[in-house]
Image (cartoon, rainbow, N blue to C red):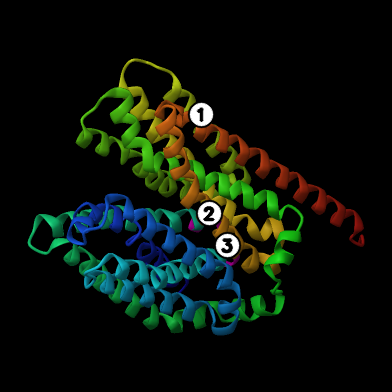
Amino acid sequence: MVSLLLAVIYLAFISLGLPDSLLGSGWPVMHVDMNAPLSAAGAITMIVAGSTILSSLCADVVTRKIGARWVIALSVLLTASSMLLFSFSTAFWQLCVIAVPYGLGAGAIDACLNNFVALHYSSRHMSWLHCFWAVGATISPYIMGAALAGSFGWTGGYRIVSFIQFGLTAVMFLSFPLWKKVGGEQEKEKEEETVHISVLQVFKLPGAVPMFVAFFAYMALEQTPSLWASSYFSDVYALDDDVAANLGSLFFIGIMVGRGLCGFIADKAGDRRLIRIGAAVILFSCILVAIPFGTHYVAVGAFVLMGLGCAPVYPSIVHSTPENFGKRHTQSVIGVQMAFAYLGNTFMAPLFGVIAQYTTIKLLPLYVGVFGIVMIVLTEYVNGLVKKRDKLAALQSPKE
């Protein structure tokens, strides 16, 4: 039963990843059909991000009222419906309106599933969970590409993904007995132990703000190469656009493969060690990218290495939440963590685009490296607070 429920949870994260790269792969055709400028995709992305942040902050309250399984099933249904509505859109403003329910559904799935796995499963499952997100994000561009190559067009690409999402929605609802049977006692225990606190109270928890900023920094450093790696190869090494695009995608493959491999060592290595290793690999890869070797091959390997370094960080930060802030506060803290992650994801990569426009894109490794240093310094600071807290608790506990 436990294994079957895990399979359902993995499917739910594939459903989260599927729509994430769909807009980018279809927009070159979509914006022409809708007489919208190429840059208008940024407005849709911003609306999705804003809705996702709002949903992440509210996920704790909603989950407490209707339960994790209902939140996940209804959220997948909401994203499936949004994808279908996207496919029937004929004007840019319609996409903007539909982006709101899509963002709300995506944020709820992300916060709720991360919380559930952090509380009830080991570190390896958290790593594999985010590996399955990467699987979904990798599949959807191929679906859109096949639809565009055929006679379906971009609307067909969205429709195909929506049908897959509706199928996953059915799986979520059919899995309700599994959630009840496998998690029955755990859910009851969690409800008794969990304490709901407001967002303001979350910020007052020792180490919360530094960890939120660390999460923000991580998402900034992950999203920057994912958005600008292809441009880096094109501008710095004068490669053809199609070659640069293919090389840039290797960063995603590094993340996906890295998270799959990390799952096998996560339980033994531990969250804190994995974050340290990931940060060290990221900083080393930044140095390799920055050194002018005169050939792009070293930079290609460095971007793959950067993806491998990123792989364990996000899952490990999320999974360490119960240890850092206590199980009873985990649900509240993870919602705010997700909000900060989306803030970093949304604003900092575009900011580098502005910086590169007025200076040079060669600053990319420096930009990523600065965020990498901020992330590791702040996570180590929180680790120190947790060690002091645990040591003090051990001294104060009555001896047998």
Q: Quadrant of residue 232?
A: top left
Residue furthest left as drawn:
151
Instruction: Assign a secondary structure to mark 3.
Output: helix
Q: Look at the image and give the residue range highlighted in magenta.
A: 119-125
The residue closer to the viewer here, 345 or 384, is: 345
Q: Is residue 39 above or below residue 114?
A: above
Q: Is residue 169 above or below residue 340?
A: below
Q: Are marks 3 and 2 in contact (CB under 8 Å)?
A: no
The residue that mark 3 highlights is 118
The residue closer to the viewer here, 110 or 95, is: 95
Answer few, some or many: residues within 10 Å of disc 2's Cα (few below 14, many 20 plus, some between 14 and 19). Answer: many
For badge 3, the amino acid type reads: Ala
Residue at the image point whose x is 75% and y is 51% from the top: 386
Pair 3/2: label in front: 2
Residue at the image point whose x is 59% and y is 58% from the top: 337
SS assignment for the magenta stretch, majority: helix
Residue at the image point whose x is 39% and y is 43% from the top: 226
Of the residues under marks 3 and 2, which one precedes in the sequence? 3
The residue that mark 1 highlights is 366
